[in-house]
Image (cartoon, grey):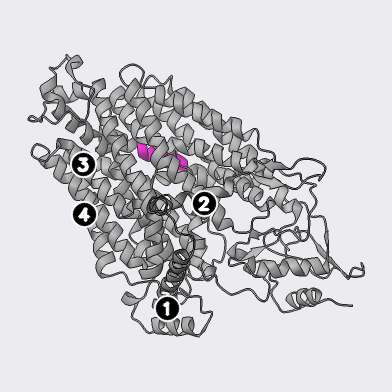
Amino acid sequence: METGIQRTLSASFAPGTRPSSRAPSRPRNSRNSSRASLRYLPQDVESMAFPEGTVGAEATELLHEFVHPQHNQHEPLFGAEPHADGGEDEDDAASLEIRRKLPWYKRPSPYWFLLVVPFAAGATIATAAPRIELFTELACIAYKDKYQVGEGNKTTDSLVGITTLAGGLTDAEKQFCAKEPRVQAAVAQLNMALMLLLGILSCMTAGWWGSISDRYGRTRVLSIAVFGLLISDVIFLSTVHFHRVLPGGYLFLLLGPLLDGLCGGMTALTATIHAYLADCTDQEHRARVFSLFLGLTFVGFGIGPTIGSAVVHVTHSALSVFYIAAGMHMFYASMVWLVVPESLSLRRQLQARKLKREKDEAARNGPQKSALAHWMSKAFGFLAPLALFWPAAVDSNPLKRKRRDWNLFLLAVAYGSTILLIGSYTYKLQYTSEAFGWTSEQMGYWLSAVGVARAVHLTAILPLVIKFFKPRPKTGPVNLPSESYEDLLQSNADLEEPTALSPPSAQHSSLPFDLALAKVSLLVEVVSYTALCFAADSLTYTVFTMAGAFGSGFGPAVSSVALALYIQRGGVESGKLFGAMSVIQSLCSQIIGPSVFGTTYIKTVGTFPKAIFILAAGAVIFSFTILMFVRLPSANASFHPGEETAMEVSHEADETLVDPEVPLIIVDDVGGKSDSPSTSTHGSPAL
């Protein structure tokens, strides 16, 4: 007797039809495509621009696809029309029809941002090195009345009390001041204050601005975010020129990140751009658009510092780079304010507003909270996703006490410990200025060299290592009762994102390799940071920092292991997992990391400035030690049909024919008999 699922599979593999891993009832596109797509890309600039940053597995695959495109070469880059609303009902179809009739300059498209992103990214990273030089000069001017050249011991430890500003500096004073420990400590204090202020406010407001973009449109939030960016530029340039008359001297710079952070900062800006790209791109082409966006961003990060250094060399002024960056930001803002059309339909906005009103109404009718508790829940609500990592109870022998699964928690701790290194990049730039006398021009060339080394590793070396050394999934047949299989397939069809069920061998066979890759990447970074402690000249320092960029395989590997451990628990929402990991990244890279490394550099710059490298090596060693306690699920673990287990299927799966290396699925009849194996799966190893 032929069961319903057998008839479905037979129809799927009938002659003249293309095999598909999707259930017939699954919607063609996700209703929440924007939010689900954000996990593919990093949410802050430092994650991609500096070697300490961690890029996840999805972003690495997209970057590799940008360099080595291999799929769908015969298809256009984007769909013929933007499927922002999914076309799942009459309202969406009507919205699409209206958009088709609009002229190209009024139609939402990824091109509005893809054409600008390399220039904007390059301008942003080009200011990293000149910023340190200008901060040092401002601190030197503030200290001028408090020391004589060669008598640095007359300076004070307090940054807040230094507001007596005098005239400019001679070249001799600049050279002396750049090596003055107390001036370097003041610059480190200023850097730490700016980073913490922007980081804390961005973490607290980015989620709120994201919710606003769902209810009132992407372009409105983008307009506010770029306004904050422009205000920050204006305050920076004004402080450099008028620090003698502004209240607080160069401490007036703190007003810039304060206003920028209230507007969401770079975190809200990049997240909203990613949502815009997802809105105006259909599911089939979305990964390719993200690949292009990420690749063009890396192009900007690679050439930006070099162009900035060339500008400084020609103009003999570090401030000229900031005028170019401000001009680029002004052009960017003008596009958002005047040209870029809205990507989110009015129907979607009204639907989001309705859901928000219902949620607020339920909160008002529920248990009342005190004003303080209500404010705390709003201000620190972004920490709620971290509850996902809390050790979950594991069913075991009823005669024994229940145990908890700490694997995901340990992995999150190891991930956060490594992400702390992002907070050290500005102090590394300071160190090069103090130790080697580098100017912003030389620091720009160094940033480009390290960025190129990292991009080569992510796009060429790491994919080759994975291709030749990662074990393939086992291809033995998987026997499942047909009724249980139907239940699994139905639960899989109800998911918002295209997913598929993966047999145990596919889930477990590559986990030891992924965990080993994460450990090896950490060892590379340990060696790099340890060697920096012995770097006596700028050449060896450059070589060792470029070598450290080859440890960036930690991000993709740990993301893969985290997803597998999350699935083992029964989790099905991979977006929730990567969202929780992005919270860890924001906390550690924007708040904890700058605090720890900034305090260390301030305390040790006069005696042993290389202490930040020892601290970095210690953080990586701690992460490596934590990973040693992670216990992977056994490759022979039993597969329980009633368990909710799902893995994401890539958009290429629908374009791939039957893969002979994929496990053969034999669906048993209720009576235990097995029909002839006339069907199999395709794409990623999945049912």
Q: Which residue is mark 3?
A: 253
Front-most of residues 63 and 350: 350
The residue sitting at 73% across, 44% down in the picture is 633
Amino acid residing under circle 3: Leu
Q: Which residue is mark 1?
A: 347
Closer to the eye: label 2 or 3 = 2
- From the viewer's perspective, tell me whether residue 431 is left or right of residue 543: left
Which residue is rendered at x = 33% and y = 27% of the image?
431
Helix, strand or loop at label 4? It is helix
Q: Measure how far apart labels 1 and 2 are at the Cα level.
A: 28 Å
Q: Provide the residue designation for mark 2.
A: 385
Which is more toward the observer, 436 or 131? 131
Marks 3 and 4 sit apart, C-alpha to C-alpha, by 19 Å
Dot placed on the residue nearer the N-terminal end, 3 or 1? 3
Q: Secondary structure at mark 2?
A: helix
Label 2 is placed on what type of residue? Pro
Label 3 close to label 4 by CB (< 8 Å): no
Q: Which amino acid type is marked by label 1? A: Arg
How far apart marks 1 and 4 lie (CA) works out to 36 Å
Q: Position of residue 232 (x, y in %)?
A: 23, 49
Quick one: SS at disc 3?
A: helix
Labelled pair 4, 2 in contact (Cβ < 8 Å): no
Find disc 4 in the rendering and name its residue: 327
Question: Disc 4 and disc 2: Cα gap in Å?
Answer: 38 Å
Query: Does dot 1 land on a helix, a strand or a loop?
Result: helix
Q: Which of the two discs, 1 and 4, sits closer to the camera? A: 1
Q: Tag 4: Cα neighbours inside 10 Å, few (<14), some, or many (≥20)?
A: some
Q: Residues within 10 Å of mark 2 (few under 14, many from 20)?
A: some
- Please state the extent of the stretch shown in magenta in the rendering: 447-454
Give the Cα distance between marks 2 and 3: 33 Å
